[in-house]
Amino acid sequence: MTRGTQVQYEAPEGLLRIEDCLDEDGGIVLPPGTTLISLIDRNIAHVGDQVAYRFLDHSQVEEHIVELTWTQLGIRLRAVAALLQQVCAPGDRVAILAPQGLDYVIGFFAAIKAGNIAVPLFAPELQGHAERLETALSDSRPNTVLTTSAADAAVQAFLAKLPGPTRPRVVLIDEVPDSAGAEFTPIPVEPDDVSHLQYTSGATRAPVGVEITHRAVGTNLLQMILSIDLLNRNTHGLSWLPLYHDMGLSMIGFPAVYGGHSTLMSPTAFIRRPQRWIRAMSEESKHGRIITAAPNFAYEWTAQRGVPAPGEDIDLGNVVLIIGSEPVLPEVITTFNEAFAPYGLPPTAFKPSYGIAEATLLISTIAPAEQASVVYFDREQLAVGRAVRVDADAEGAVAHVSCGQPARSLWAVIVDPATADDSAAELPDGQIGEIWLHGNNIGRGYWGRPEQTRATFGVSLHSRLAEGSHADGLPAQATWLRTGDLGVYFEGQFYVTGRMADLVQIDGRSHYPHDIEATVAAASTLVRRGYVTAFTVPSTDGTSGAGLVVIAERAAGTTRVDPQDADAAVRAAVAERHGLTVADLRFLPAGAIPRTTSGKLARVACRAQYLEGTLGAR
């Protein structure tokens, strides 16, 4: 779909111009030969002395800032890529298992420059995710692992435990001398070559590697730039998000497009002191507009623990905040706005967005000048697949935050999930269905899974709306990506209502788990807000029905509190608001509920551990 954004962007001589990436209708069409590496090479040639990436190192008592100019980045990329060419063949996978930092950035881009397929993962020091790391390594079968000297011992120990006769060699990024670059041999990299494998978060199933091409990356970065109006080099990225996460990678992709820079910090530094994120926003905004991104929990955590001391010189007037959880919680936006409005945060700062790894990242967001908005849908109508507006104070009102409009040159249709694959039908606005996507930002498929790729990335839409179809402009034979997410168009806005795999199905009705979880959190102060999961398990009474299970972590300071009153309050609230009986309710210590590497609730994993009897085991 094409938005009416006016492109006004003066790129320095030699850099990519946004207007050169648009056709006569305003659609995104990358110039021939555009790849991540060609974009970086342009920046090296024309703004080589400018900062490309900086890292705020909080590992010591005092903050230490490390910077890389484009020229310095180019030297390091040639050196590491040259070494990789000596030990890898083109197309080999190269996994990055490095700590957060500039060496990670170097390793990621160097693997691509060498003609390999980068596999951005994480060092084994990330607690609680060893199984995910082992799954990704076993699936991608990398020839080589890139890490740093600081993480070498942990990486070697982890790799030694992996099954199989052959294990990848390990290359230490920070020990490759600059002089190694003299041996680098330029190789052709095409836009439709796979640049990297983006492993999914594992929220609803085991992680799988999405094949992301250079064309998909370039298209999606331009979609973000146009959607959020990042049309000048004085807009900079700021991120603590893990670099193996799709949004974390996008934060190092932005500068490659327009020659600006991104400032990075580690997730641990943020979690320990969220005020560091706020101070970095304020400092960076002195030099231009700042774009940052995080899920619900991060904004909530920062509003609780990151508010500056009275009188501290903090100015957030130049900040754009992407919030990309499913779903975006309106109370999180409200709480953060109230906490930081005194520091100049504009009411239009928040940009509720929707994205998935299969689409490289961004799918939809609100317009640059728009303020985050909320609509209330009737719970009973949601249960039968209809979005019906009610007043905020109406009984059964469920809040939903608008995710705006699909990005430019991306088509999103709502499809009846009940129809068979060979008769998939587009639903009219106001009806909830599965979100299907088409565009050049879509990944090529799942690594090593041809059948799953065909079933997910190659489906056909057999019936479109006669009027108002969101597939207008595409040929009838166009193929689509099935997202597995549920959404609806309502009064010109796009809403994401939940995941199909997470739906709580009881007695023929559908209930959204996050709605039940919100009820549980509000029912008792014993419940740790944001740390509740709801799912179904087979009934134990011999019937074919399903029983509702609720798992809640205890709030701080409630370890010794008798849960009897909380148990009664939660059960009563769920029965009253949702008409459901809780078959089993458990209160567990903080940290017991599994989460994905990006911090999302892993309901499927939680259910699996519950059924195995291992949930909460230390």
Image (cartoon, helix red, strand yellow):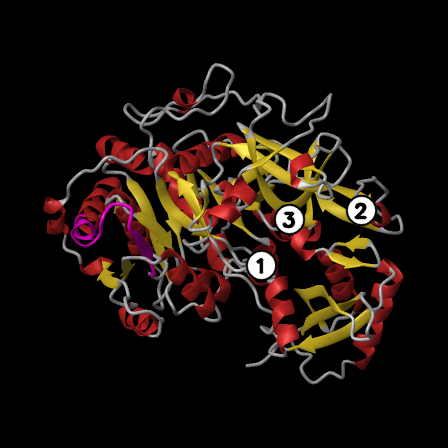
Q: Magenta part of the protein: which range?
A: 82-97
Does label 1 or label 2 sit earlier along the sequence?
Answer: 2
Q: Which mark is residue 382?
A: 2
Rendered location of residue 235, percent (x, y): 43, 36
Helix, strand or loop under label 2:
helix
For the question of whether residue 119 can be seen, the reply is yes
Q: Quadrant of the C terminus?
A: bottom right
Rendered view: 411 above or below 238: above
Q: Which mark is residue 337?
A: 3
- Relative to the observer, which residue lies in front, 516 or 11? 516
The residues tagged by marks 3 and 2 sit, at their Cα atoms, a distance apart of 29 Å
- Residue type, label 1: Lys
Does label 3 or label 2 sit earlier along the sequence?
Answer: 3
The residue to which callout 1 is attached is 600
The residues tagged by marks 3 and 1 sit, at their Cα atoms, a distance apart of 22 Å
The residues tagged by marks 1 and 2 sit, at their Cα atoms, a distance apart of 23 Å
Which numbered mark, 3 or 1, is in the foreground of this view?
1
Rendered location of residue 543, percent (x, y): 83, 70
Q: Which mark is residue 36?
A: none
Helix, strand or loop under label 1:
loop
- Residue type, label 2: Leu
Q: Are marks 3 and 1 in contact (CB under 8 Å)?
A: no
Label 2: few (<14), some (14–19) or many (≥20) C-alpha neighbours in 10 Å: some
- Please report the residue visible at 75 percent of the width from the left and 32 percent of the height from the top: 429
